[in-house]
Amino acid sequence: MKDENKKKPSTLLTHTGRAGAAHFGAVNPPVYHASTILFDSYADIINNRGDYTYGRRGTPTSRALEEVISGLENADGTLLLPSGLAACTLTLLALCKQGDHVLVPDNAYESTRSFSQKILPDFGIETEIYDPTVKDISPLIRDNTALIFLESPGSQTFELMDLQMIIKIAQENNILTAMDNTWASPLFCKPLDMGIDVSVQSATKYVSGHADCLLGYVSARKKIYNRLKKMYGLLGLCVGPDDVAMTLRGVRTLDVRLKRHQESALKIAKWLEKQEQVKHVHHPALESHPQHDFWKRDFSGAGGLFAIELHPCSETQIAAMLDDMSLFGMGYSWGGYESLMIPVILLRQLGPERGPLLRLHIGLEDVEDLLEDLTEGFKRFDEASL
């Protein structure tokens, strides 16, 4: 399709990565299970010539998903990985070397921060944790700073970064930037268009959207993509064909699903602001959020994930509420069709003290049913305090 990336998201999601003529007119590309791929000639195998040479290097199934994602991200290339964490660690390993200094935000995904602090030092790479709400990152820049990692908002406490300030300073100092954009997805934030070098995503969440597969990806423009691809190949990374196919199927409805997540989550967040048990609702799209202006400037929407901060209470009260929720499940990850609620254990090194936190993911259920479930949960919460 000509000018594919200029199509609206819902159209791009529906028509990109199909190549029906190559699959006998089938609407969806088949699932290729392949390790060995045969060459046509001695010359081809000696020169490693062909669109497909080995299963780990890609099949028509994986290329179809890469094409869809690159279209969403306005990227020159996308690499599929076994998880969102693998996407984060690949980025750190590919863009940093011995003697480098990397900045990682205090609100980053716990495993990303742990990898940065526990594994990167073994490669001679120093990690410095920084406050995600920093007003000027310049004082943290060193001569050997190679990468600034970003996560906005953080997926537990939901602070938003001044992305434009950080991007400007990074570019002035020839420092690369990479952003974990899982909360917004490529529909509601375009990191590459903002000037960020790598867009990192846990496609386990909204992109696949059905809580049944694990997958991550990195997208970038050509020069940085080639650096990522080199490390990707040397690490032997790849994704199984069934997870690719399920993600390709799920991403087709991303636009429709995400709009529903957004609408329902905002209604529930506004309702929660009025509940006496709730001290604060941490949702970037609410005007009460301290960095709401950054959300309006840098994002075109909000997903279904946010947190509530409770007034001081006992664990008994929290357990009484969560244990008997009928619609909100307790489980890790998010971005599927079901609603979730879990207690947040903060591992922050910087920032203010907070009361008990609960993280909510609002799924695709009817809002009124979810509100009824929350209402009953708060009744149990109150009764447990007596």
Image (spheres, helix red, strand yellow):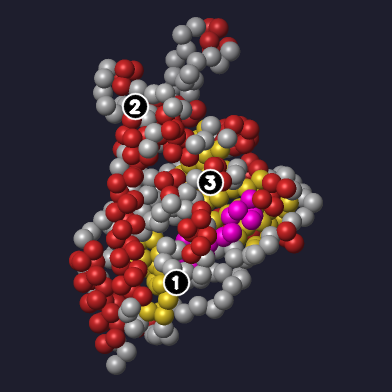
Direction from residue 158 to residue 341 in the image, left or right: left
Q: What is the span of residues highlighted in magenta in the rendered image?
A: 155-167
Q: Is residue 118 above or below residue 208?
A: below
Of 343 and 350, which appears nearest the observer? 350
Mark nearest the camera among 3 and 2 is 3
Cα distance in 3D space between marks 1 and 2:
43 Å
Could you tell me if the residues under marks 1 and 2 are in contact, i.e. CB atoms within 8 Å?
Answer: no
Q: Is residue 218 above or below residue 269?
A: above
Q: Would residue 257 be visible to someone looking at this image?
A: yes
Q: What's the residue type where badge 1 is placed?
A: Ser
The residue to which callout 1 is attached is 288
Q: What's the residue type where badge 2 is placed?
A: Arg
Cα distance in 3D space between marks 3 and 2:
25 Å
- Which of the image's four quarters has the N terminus? top left
The residue to which callout 3 is attached is 191
Q: What's the residue type where badge 3 is placed?
A: Pro
- Find residue 331 and report its horizontal and vertical position in percent: 35, 62
Q: Residues within 10 Å of mark 3 (few under 14, many from 20)?
A: many
The residue to which callout 2 is attached is 18
Residue 328 sits in quarter: bottom left
Of 314 and 268, which appears nearest the observer? 268
